Image: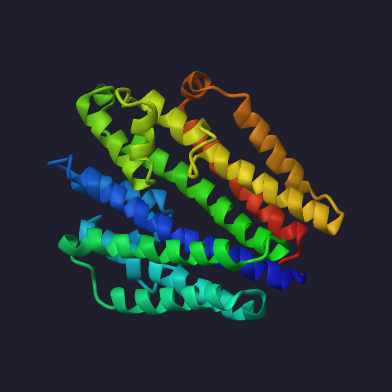
């Protein structure tokens, strides 16, 4: 496969996953804001920071008002990572690799863009926000369903899934970090009912609340939730699940092309690093420090994939 085609598939699905996860991050911020009667701007600043948009946002706005942050992350054309921007980019990449996609996948991506263009034509008022975020997630699920239901399990599928899981791992890590590092008003609240409510909100934002309740019904604590989101191999949005899927897709490409690259070794090392950890050692290191290191290593993995498969060659 041409590197340009592989890159188009990879970034098409990275962008689709980013749109969904930006919606999830906004939902986390919105729900957590409901638990804070004061200083909501700090919470929304943390959301913008976690999305990697605080710097560019501050160049345009004076303070972190909820409506401004929501608008910037959902639909601002000046924000290259806004939902509207990345869905358009995904559609542009889909056009680039149109002959590699089934009709169903192309139609789902194109319908997603048309829906987002109408849905986000005007600023979203907070009373409509939950409905809008639901639609963004639903549209992403339709594309994912078309991919799973109609595409051959070949190198095209592997590059699409690599984009999904590299982005998913990054976003799950960032959602964990926005809770633990910035949202509690004081460290004295750790272990309090407020702390537990916010962890519950984080679970909801990654569609893992009910799954967690099935497994640990009465243990809504920082330790148990962090363990679930980082180390539970059964959870489709956990860090280790995303890494293991990335490894599997890279191994498929290695077998198909008969060539092993540095990205495969790096991904394997990351998986082994998580398998050798327990949540106690992660908290001893510092959850924020652990997450920062994970995001750095995951970003390096994404760059290695681009270089090894010559996306821009």
Quadrant of the rendering where the C terminus is positioned: bottom right
Does residue 193 appear to the left or right of 27 in the view shown? left
Q: Position of residue 196 (x, y in %)?
A: 27, 29
Q: Position of residue 262 (x, y in %)?
A: 78, 47
Does residue 173 appear to the left or right of 212 in the view shown? right
Q: Is residue 227 above or below residue 312?
A: above
Q: At 61% from the left edge and 57% from the top edge, which residue is drawn? A: 161
Q: Position of residue 101 (x, y in %)?
A: 62, 74
Q: At 36% from the left edge and 51% from the top edge, which residue is drawn? A: 25
Where residue 193 sits, quadrant-wise, is top left
Does residue 136 appear to the left or right of 164 in the view shown? left
Quadrant of the rendering where the N terminus is positioned: bottom right
- Single out the residue that lies furthest toward the right: 258
Where residue 113 sits, quadrant-wise, is bottom left
Q: At 26% from the left edge and 29% from the top edge, which residue is drawn? A: 195
From where the camera sits, is residue 120 visible?
Answer: no
- Single out the residue that lies furthest toward the left: 37
């Amino acid at each position: 496969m041409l590197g340009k085609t592989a890159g188009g598939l990879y970034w098409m699905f990275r962008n689709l996953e980013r749109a969904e996860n930006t919606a999830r991050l906004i939902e986390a911020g919105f729900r957590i804001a409901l638990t804070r009667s004061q200083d909501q701007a700090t919470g929304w600043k943390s959301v913008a920071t976690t999305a990697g948009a605080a710097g560019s946002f501050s160049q345009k706005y004076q303070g972190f008002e909820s409506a401004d942050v929501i608008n910037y992350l959902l639909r601002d054309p000046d924000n290259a990572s806004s939902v509207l921007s990345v869905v358009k980019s995904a559609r542009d990449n889909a056009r680039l690799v149109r002959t590699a996609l089934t009709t169903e996948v192309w139609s789902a991506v194109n319908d997603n863009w048309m829906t987002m263009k109408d849905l986000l034509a005007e600023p979203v008022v907070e009373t409509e926000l939950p409905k809008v975020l639901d639609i963004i997630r639903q549209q992403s699920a339709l594309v994912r369903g078309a991919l799973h239901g109609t595409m051959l399990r070949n190198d095209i599928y592997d590059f699409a899934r690599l984009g999904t899981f590299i982005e998913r791992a990054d976003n799950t890590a960032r959602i964990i970090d926005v809770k633990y590092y910035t949202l509690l008003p004081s460290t004295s609240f750790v272990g309090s009912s407020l702390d537990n409510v916010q962890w519950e909100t984080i679970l909801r934002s990654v569609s893992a609340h009910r799954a967690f309740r099935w497994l640990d019904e009465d243990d809504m604590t920082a330790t148990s939730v962090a363990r679930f989101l980082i180390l539970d191999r059964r959870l489709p949005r956990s860090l280790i699940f995303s890494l293991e899927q990335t490894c599997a897709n890279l191994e498929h490409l290695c077998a198909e092309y008969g060539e092993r690259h540095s990205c495969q070794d790096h991904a394997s090392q990351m998986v082994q690093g998580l398998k050798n950890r327990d949540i106690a050692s992660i908290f001893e290191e510092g959850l924020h420090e652990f997450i920062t290191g994970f995001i750095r290593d995951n970003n390096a993995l994404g760059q290695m994939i681009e270089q090894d498969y010559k996306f821009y060659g």
